[in-house]
Structure formats: structure tokens, C-alpha cells
Image: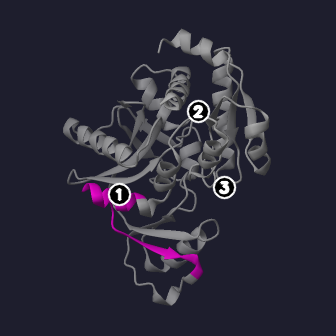
């Protein structure tokens, strides 16, 4: 659709940006939501700000919304919960649907999809808070311990010594019922984004401290981003193909961002897919889009256009 025509259509709609929420990724969500609101304002498009919580369920119907922009990260935002509520309320929304969001949010379910698609992913074991017994763990290092249903690299640990594993698992249980323990893959971390039907160029992530943790992600200057990634063209094409396959296998729509690791032999390992990528000043999807001439405002427009078009089908 012509951008000017799309803007005119959106100026007539009641738009709300869902942000904040109750997960431990609240602060990132608030930053993402505000960046989107600022973008819409630059384009002359009004949008209400909804700090998502229990009260937001009533506002879905009482405000008679035309479209919701989802800027929520983590629990209740990316896991299909708010998407299901919006489906019931009959409100179109940006991003992936209920099932896609739930599957992508679960790193264990994503691994099953990887295996069914024949895509290489690190081997992993899942431990549940309800029956976790430290005496029965038999794990060899190095491993990566992470929440099975979280993001923003919160409570993610690289364990080089065996006595680090149990504390790392217990740290995960402070915010998640499932801890995923993966084999550590030594290599180059890259991310590949998708907007609509367009696969964006891969970004190589070089964290100053060697580990792309929460601080590295959201502190300007803590990470160097290489666009294009410093890898062979054939390897980058393979990474982009894998990302597209997983985006489609998970039935995603709108925008997504996947993380992959390329080891020293050139093997591409799929790690995870985010259905609501961050849109802050340090976020990777806007960086990748900018590398091919898609501005931040155009990226926001593309997300809203996808929501409107999907609602017609």
C-alpha cells in the first residue's frame, strides 16, 4: 500500500500501544512502546498508551479500539495471552497470532520445531521448578542455562564450571517454571530479522564483555554491531534461509527476529525467535531495517499495515 495512503487510513483509526506489562522485561517494553508512540506522532498519527495489566482487558472493548500495537515483552505479552484476549475482543493487532506466539516464546517447543524441520540447534535438557532435585543433575560443562520462557537475556548464564550450574538453574526459577540447559556453542552470534515478506541482512553481535547479556543489549556502547556480518556470503545466506524457514514453520507474521550462532566450522545453529522484537535505540531489528533503507517510521508502518491486511483476510 502507498505510504501516504496508509498514513491517512491510520489517522482515522483508534490505535493503542500496549506496553509495560508485568513481566521482568517491563522496562524494555516501556522503552519500545514509547519509541513507537513517538514514531506515530512524527507521522501525525495519534495513539493511546496502555500500560498493560488487568485493567487493559476492559479497555479493549470499552475504548472500541481499531488496532493494537503490541510492544509487550515477556510473560503475558509474547506468549499468546494478550493475543488471545484481543482475538476474543475482535481487535486486530500487530505481530504473530496466539499459537505462533506461544510456540516461539517456549524455547523447548521451538527446539521441537527445529528438529522437525531438520534445523541444527544445540542439544538441551529442561528442568522444572516443581520437581527439581539438585542431587539428580548430571551435567557437563560448558553449558548455557536460561529461562525456557523468557527474553532480554535475563537470568542467562554461561557455566564453565560444574559448580556454577545448580545456582544458575535456581536463579532461573526466580522468574520461570522451566530452566533450559543447552550445550554451549562457541562461535559468532548473529541475528536475522524479518519484516513482512522481507528477510533483513544479518547483524553480527560483538559484546564488549564477551557475553551478550542484558547490560550488553540495552546499554549504548557495550556492544559492537557489524552490518554486514563478517562471515562468508554462503554462511549468511544459509542463516537467512534458516530464519525464514523457522518464521514460516512457527506460522509467524509481521516482524520477527531470530538469533543464531555460527561455529568455527561454519555450522549455523538456530537459538531462538522473538515475535515482538525490541524497538529501542539499541534494538537490532531497526538497525537491520536501516541497513537496507527502511526507516524506523517505515518499520512501524509496515507492522501496522500487516495487522490491517491480516484483519481483512
- Asked if residue 119 can be seen in this view, the reply is no
Q: Position of residue 160 (x, y in %)?
A: 42, 71
- Asked if residue 265 can be seen in this view, the reply is yes
User: Element type at marker 2?
Assistant: loop
Lateral position of residue 95 relative to residue 8, left or right: left
Q: In the image, which is nearer the foreground, mark 2 or mark 1?
A: 1
According to the image, label 1 marks what residue?
113
Using the image as rendered, state which of residue 284 and residue 247 is in the foreground. Answer: 247
The span from disc 2 to disc 3 (Cα, nearest Å) is 19 Å
> How many residues crowd around disc 1 within 10 Å: few (fewer than 14), some, or many (20 or more)?
some
Lateral position of residue 310 relative to residue 271, left or right: right
Q: Is residue 128 above or below residue 133?
A: above
According to the image, label 3 marks what residue?
24
> How many residues crowd around disc 2 within 10 Å: few (fewer than 14), some, or many (20 or more)?
some
Q: Position of residue 231 (x, y in %)?
A: 26, 40
Q: In the image, which is nearer the foreground, mark 2 or mark 3?
A: 3
Q: Position of residue 219 (x, y in %)?
A: 59, 42
Magenta residues span: 110-130
Using the image as rendered, state which of residue 92 and residue 267 is in the foreground. Answer: 92
Residue 82 circle label: none
The residue drawn where x is 51% and y is 13% is: 3
Q: Is residue 123 magenta?
A: yes
The residue drawn where x is 60% and y is 43% is: 87
- Tag count: 3
Lateral position of residue 262 relative to residue 162, left or right: left
Q: Is residue 4 magenta?
A: no
User: Element type at marker 3?
Assistant: loop
The span from disc 2 to disc 1 (Cα, nearest Å) is 32 Å
User: Element type at marker 1?
Assistant: helix
According to the image, label 2 marks what residue?
281
Amino acid at each position: 500500500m502507498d505510504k501516504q495512503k496508509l498514513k491517512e487510513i491510520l489517522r482515522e483509526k483508534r490505535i493503542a500501544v500496549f506496553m509495560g506489562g508485568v513481566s521482568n522485561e517491563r522496562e524494555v517494553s516501556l522503552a519500545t512502546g514509547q519509541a513507537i508512540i513517538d514514531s506515530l506522532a512524527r507521522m501525525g498519527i495519534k495513539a493511546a498508551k496502555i500500560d498493560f495489566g488487568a485493567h487493559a482487558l476492559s479497555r479493549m472493548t470499552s475504548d472500541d479500539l481499531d488496532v493494537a500495537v503490541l510492544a509487550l515483552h515477556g510473560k503475558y505479552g509474547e506468549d499468546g495471552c494478550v493475543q488471545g484476549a484481543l482475538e476474543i475482543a475482535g481487535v486486530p493487532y500487530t505481530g504473530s497470532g496466539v499459537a505462533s506466539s506461544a510456540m516461539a516464546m517456549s524455547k523447548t517447543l521451538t527446539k521441537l520445531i527445529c528438529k522437525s524441520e531438520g534445523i541444527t540447534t544445540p542439544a538441551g535438557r529442561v528442568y522444572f521448578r516443581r520437581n527439581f532435585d539438585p542431587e539428580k543433575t548430571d551435567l557437563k560443562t560448558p553449558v548455557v542455562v536460561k529461562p525456557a520462557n523468557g527474553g532480554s537475556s535475563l537470568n542467562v548464564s554461561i557455566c564453565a564450571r560444574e559448580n556454577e550450574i545448580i545456582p544458575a538453574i535456581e536463579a532461573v526459577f526466580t522468574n520461570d517454571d522451566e530452566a533450559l540447559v543447552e550445550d554451549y556453542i562457541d562461535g559468532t552470534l548473529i541475528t536475522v530479522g524479518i519484516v513482512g515478506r522481507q528477510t533483513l541482512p544479518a547483524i553480527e553481535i560483538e559484546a564488549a564483555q564477551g557475553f551478550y547479556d542484558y547490560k550488553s543489549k540495552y546499554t549504548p556502547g557495550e556492544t559492537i554491531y557489524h552490518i554486514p556480518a563478517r562471515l562468508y556470503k554462503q554462511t549468511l545466506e544459509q542463516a537467512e534461509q534458516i530464519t525464514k524457514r523457522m518464521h514460516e514453520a512457527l506460522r509467524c507474521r509481521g516482524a520477527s527476529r531470530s538469533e543464531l550462532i555460527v561455529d568455527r566450522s561454519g555450522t549455523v545453529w538456530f537459538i531462538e525467535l522473538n515475535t515482538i522484537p525490541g524497538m529501542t535505540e539499541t534494538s537490532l531489528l531497526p538497525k537491520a531495517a536501516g541497513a537496507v533503507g527502511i526507516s524506523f517510521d517505515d518499520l512501524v508502518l509496515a507492522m501496522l499495515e500487516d495487522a490491517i491486511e491480516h484483519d481483512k483476510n
